[in-house]
Every structure is written in structure tokens, then in C-alpha cells.
Amino acid sequence: MSKITIPLGPQHPALKEPENFMLVLEGEQIENATINLGYNHRGMEKAAEERTFIQNMYLLERVCGICSHSHTTCYVTNVEEAAKAEVPERALAIRVLVGELERVHSHLLWLGVAAYEIGFETLFMYTWRDREQVLDCLELLSGNRVHYSINTIGGVRRDITPEQKNEVLKRINFLEERTKYYIKVATEEPTVRARAANVGKLPYEVALERGAVGPTARASGVKRDVRKDAPYLLYDKLDFNLITHDSCDVFGRVVVRALELMESYKLIKQVLNYLPEGPLTVKVPPRIAPAEVVNLYEAPRGEDIHYLKTNGTDKPERLKVRAPTLANLQSVTYMLEGGWLADVPLVIAAIDPCMSCTDRAMVYDRKTDKTQVYDWEDLRRLGIEAYKRKGVDFSKF
Amino acid sequence: MHTDSLLASAVYLIVFPGFIFLTAYGLFLQWVDRKLCAVMQNRVGPPWYQPTADFIKLLAKETIIPDACDTAIFKVLPYFAIAAVISALMLIPLWKTESLFAPFQGNMVVVVYLLTIPTVTFFLAGWSSASPYSTVGSMRVLTQLFAYEVPLMLSLIGPAILAGSWNLSEISVFFAGRPALMAAQLIGFLVAILALQGKLERMPFDIPHAKNEIVGGQFTEYSGRLLAYFNLAVDMELVVGAALLSAVFLGGAWGLYGAAGLALFLAKTLAVTFLLALLKVLMARLRIEQMVNFCWKILAPMAMAQILLDIVIKSRL
């Protein structure tokens, strides 16, 4: 049989965001897979340079709709470190709380998406119904379901009252029961097992070599979790386990995420019962002296890296975001090759991809078949040339 | 042939239980199926007129025919599928013991043969579309056909052996009078339900048009009226499949006729639809090679066991 090249994306029912995977098929099996990024580049890093530190918080929240708290926390920690501000412990505790609630909602969402990709729509409907509980908790605490905006530079915006604490604990106990049921379904249901076991294999060595992060790496037996390796916020004071699994396949990724949910419930209860008294914020001056800071944060999808360079003004000189998906995408081609076409959506979904968080711009010239990355000077030169052809000369400005 | 019988045949074919009734009941069963799944999945589900509205909407839409495809075949296939399904219905006993046309020995085989034609049109539809998704989809249609067709046929042979007849009405009469023997066909019935699920390309066997993998599968390039008729053919196939199982395994009309027989027919097809909906909700989609393994290694031996059981029972009768 001759080989068929199938484009999966940029528009495809399996992908929630535009991205392109070119699959060369030999029958039903994949011989070669190529990933093309760049359909969803939003130029956020550049936009951040034009905004003040406070404005950037709201911009960076929108890097990702699901790990919005991860990105702001990482960014805000950077700003506070550059300004040498001491954040009160109560604020740190609330950040941990919202961060863990966010992990719960992200993992439940992922479980639903993974079930949907293998056509198990009932599990998808059930997990998303129960996910409403954690979204309600977040709304109760922050006023918003998705972009919580709980962080502010120097602390958090809202306090937690005892009534809120009881309500959250009640809902978390309910979710714990439901999660136990989902673990049972996802690990014992024969069709789920048949579809997830031995699919998208990523051996330990390859996971290390390709720099996989988060649950993808942990399901290949790599003990890698920023919360343990370089504790931030209050994580060094909290008691939780690092979950790994050594099956190195999609099934392992399901198990890791499901068990991490249980750890998150444990963390939420600890933080709610800990909550030290004290102020919520410290004052941070709007202008920040020149400094360079890097911070890591364990987002639900893995290690999130933010780099910040300040220059004495109220705007950053340079801001750099490396979302976890970019690290995990390197492993996807390895996982796809040699697999079945039917497993492609599941394997891609198993890294919990967030394409728009990770997208990079690249210019591809069809005539010369060359790809090129433009820097700021190139873009400026091209813009000036383009306007010159229209009769306007901007080169003097 | 008399004008009377010609007229009667035309009414049978076009009005009842042919095209019009089958369309209405097919759309109704589609709604029942969707509503049942929705309720089982904790959703609200569509209102009763949704399938009809979908059908009318599709009829009104523009039909786009790709340049690369084989236009004549592409256009004519949906009608072939519908014609085959209606012909199959005419050979199955519905609300009375006798089927409407051709109550001859061997009409069971003809029904199974006629029910294979829609699947072949699905394959040709995908193949003539000449798009990568539909090509993969149509290859899967054929692979799947070879997987479920054998267990389905084997599961129907068991009751036929026991009843000593290849005539659907005789089989149904035989079992209607012997409930104990009907109960002994349980394994065969399970196999037939699963194989029917594969024939109708429903979860967990909706592999040929798995939307997360190959978009619309064999129907990717179909649109407008042609797609509406293909969808209708699938709905009609559900009715005919349920009617076939009801005639072979559930004793047909139980000697009833007229309104009572029709009510029994509707009740049985609804029961079969319920079982099919339950299967759809309970499982994840299989891979094509897992489906073939399942059909050949589990379903086919189960059907053979049923045949052996039936032979043993027959020797004791």
C-alpha cells in the first residue's frame, strides 16, 4: 500500500487550538510525524515591554486560560524578588491554595479531554460536571471562575473568611470521593486500559534527553517536580508526595495525574488549616531598580519558567515565558512515530498541550523553502521598507 | 399481477412500512438513542424534533462535490444505501407473522446480504471522495466489515439451525412458542447486538468515522442533501437491524397482528435501541486492530459455542 500523508490540523476536531502535525502513514501506522508551530502567536512578550508591572499581571494571566494563576504567580514572584519585597506568609498560603485548586481543575479537565479523545464521552461529561465544584470554589475565593486575578504585586487581593474555608473543605471532600471513583474507572475499565496502555511510549532516558517536564516526565519515572526540587511559596512546609509511575505510557500519565489530584486535595486541606494570621500585602514601589530574575513554578502541565529584566522604570526591559508545553512538545514526535493513527489524538492530549501558551513565530518562505526567525531590528527594517513602497517614509523616526 | 396488488406493493414500499414510515421511525429512534445517551451521561439531550430538524436543514444546504471525486458514483451512493435498507425491511416480519414480500426459505440470508450493501456504499463513498481522511475512513469501513460480518452471520445461524428453517417468519414462530429455547439463545443475542453495533458504526465501533482521528471518516467530503440521505440510511439501518434481531431472537410478532403486533414491534425495536445506547455510553472507542481481534477471537467463538449448544439442544428435542 502506498504511503498517505495526513495533515492533523491546524483545523481538526482533535485539536482545541490551531497547530499542525503532518503524519506520514503506512496503512494505519505512523512512519513519520512533524510538528509545525506558529498558528497562534500573540506577541505577548513584546506587549509586556509596553506595559507597567501591574498591567502586565493581567496580560500574563491571559497567557493561558487554564494555568492563569501559574503564570501570574511566577511573574509576580519575579517582580517581588527584583524589588526585594518580603511577601507576608498569609498571602503565600492563599497563593498556594489557589494554585492547588487550579491544579485540581486542570487535571479534572485533562481527564475529561483524554476520555473524549478516545471516544469515552460519558467519562468526559462526568469529570466536567464535577469540575464545576472546584470552579465554584475558585469563584467563591476570587470572584472569577477562570482568570482568578488573586495575585497582586506584594501579596494577594482577597482574604479567606472562615465560612469560605468551610465551604471549600466541603466541596473538596466531595471531589475526593468522586476522584476515587474516577481512578477506579480509568484504571479498571477494559476499553480505557486497552486504549491507554502501551501507547505513546516515552522511556526514561528519552524523557530526560528531550527535557520532558511535569506529569509527562513523572509518568516516565523521572522524579522532577519544582515543588520538591526548588520549593517556592510554602511548599517546603507542606507534606505531599511526588507521584511517579514507570509504565512510561499514556496509562501512566493518567495514573500520575489522578494520584496528583489526591495529593492536591491533601495540600488544600493542609493550607486551609494552616493559614497564618497577618497582612495580605506589602507595598512595592512602582519603579524597580535594574535586576535580572528567573523563577520556576510547577504549573499543572509542568515546569513554567519566567525570566524578568528590569531597568529602573515601571516597565520591564525584557520578559520571557517558557510554558511547559514547549518542553513537552519535543517528546511528542518520538511518542507518535511507530504508533497507530487512532492513538494520535490521545498521545497529543496526554502531554496536556496548551498551544497558544507555547507558540513561537517563525517565517517560512515558500519560494525558497527557508525558515527564518526575525528579531526586532529585522521587523523594523521590513516595516519601513513596506511603507516606503507605499510612499510613506518612516526611517527618520 | 393485479392492479390491486401493484397498488398495495407501492403503498408498502413508499408509505408504510416503506420509505415514509421508515424515515419517521428512523428519525424517532435516532432521537430515542440520543436522548437515552444524554440522560445516561447526565446531560439534557435534544428535543424530539431535533433529528428531523437536522435532516431538513441538511436538505436545504448546498451540496459541495469535490473536483477530484468520481461525480456519478459520489452522487448516487446515498440512494443505493437507502434502497437496500428498505428492501431488507420488506423481507422481515414486522407486525404479523408473515413478512410483506417473498416469505421464502432463505430470506434471512437475503436480509443479511441486503444489509451489507449500505456498508459497501460507505466504503465506495469514502473511496470516491479522494481525500486522505475519507480514504483512511473507507479502508477502516472494509476492515470492520470483515470483522463483524462473520460473528453476525454465525449468531443468526444458531436460531436457524434450531428452528430448522432459513425463513425469518418460521424462525420467529418457532421461538414464539418455545420461550425456554428463546432464553437459551442469550449468547447468540449478545454477539448479534455487539456485531450490530459494529455494523451501525456506533461507539465503541465508530472507528471508520472517529471524529477525533479522521474528522468525518468516509463522509468527510459529503455535504447537503447527499449527507442527509446517508445519515437517514444509517438511521433506517438501525430500525432494520433492530427488526431483524427482534424477528430472529425475540420471537417476532408472537402470533399477534394489526395494531397489537405493531405495538409489540415498536416495543421490541425500542428495547434493542436501549441496549445499543447502553453499549454506546459504557465504552471507549477501540482501535481498528483491537476491534478485529475482539470480533475474531471473542465474538466468533462465542457465536460458534451458541451453534454447538443449538445442535445439542436440537438432537435432544
Image (spheres, coloured by chain):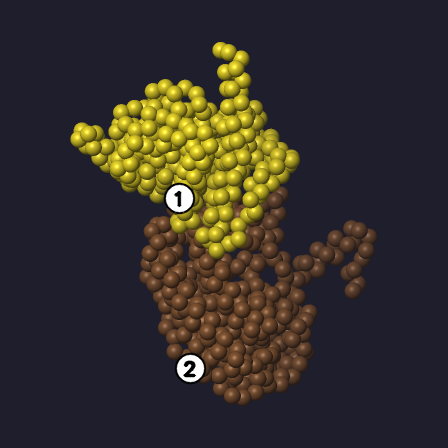
**Mark 2 Cα within 10 Å, few/some/many (few <14, many 20+)?**
few
The residue lying at 62 percent from left, 43 percent from top is A367
Image height of B8 relative to B52, above or below? above
Give the SS element for disc 1. helix
Residue B42, image x and y in percent?
Answer: 48, 55
| Location of residue A375 by image quarter | bottom right
Residue pointed to by mark 1: B275
How far apart marks 1 and 2 lie (CA) works out to 53 Å
The secondary element bearing badge 2 is classed as helix
Which numbered tag is attached to residue A237?
Answer: 2
Q: Nearer the viewer, residue A14 or B42?
A: B42
Quarter-of-image position of residue B146: top left
Report x, y in % for residue A133.
Answer: 50, 67
Nearer to us in this view, B221 or B130: B221
Left or right: A224, with B47 as reference point: left
- Under mark 2, the amino acid is Lys
Residue A14 in view of the camera: yes
Name the quarter where the C terminus of chain B is drawn: top left
* Label annotation for residue B203: none
Left or right of A78? Residue A103 is left
Residue furthest toward the bottom?
Answer: A278
Residue at far right of view:
A391
Residue at x 64% of width, y 75% of height: A53
Chain that is brown in the image: A
- The chain drawn yellow is chain what? B
Q: Chain of mark 2?
A: A
Q: Nearer the viewer, residue B245 or A83?
A: B245
Left or right of A223 in this view: A113:
right
Residue A278: which quarter of the image?
bottom right
Query: Could you tell me residue A18's position as x and y percent?
Result: 57, 52
**In the image, what residue occupies the spot 51% across and 85% down?**
A89
Q: Chain of mark 1?
A: B
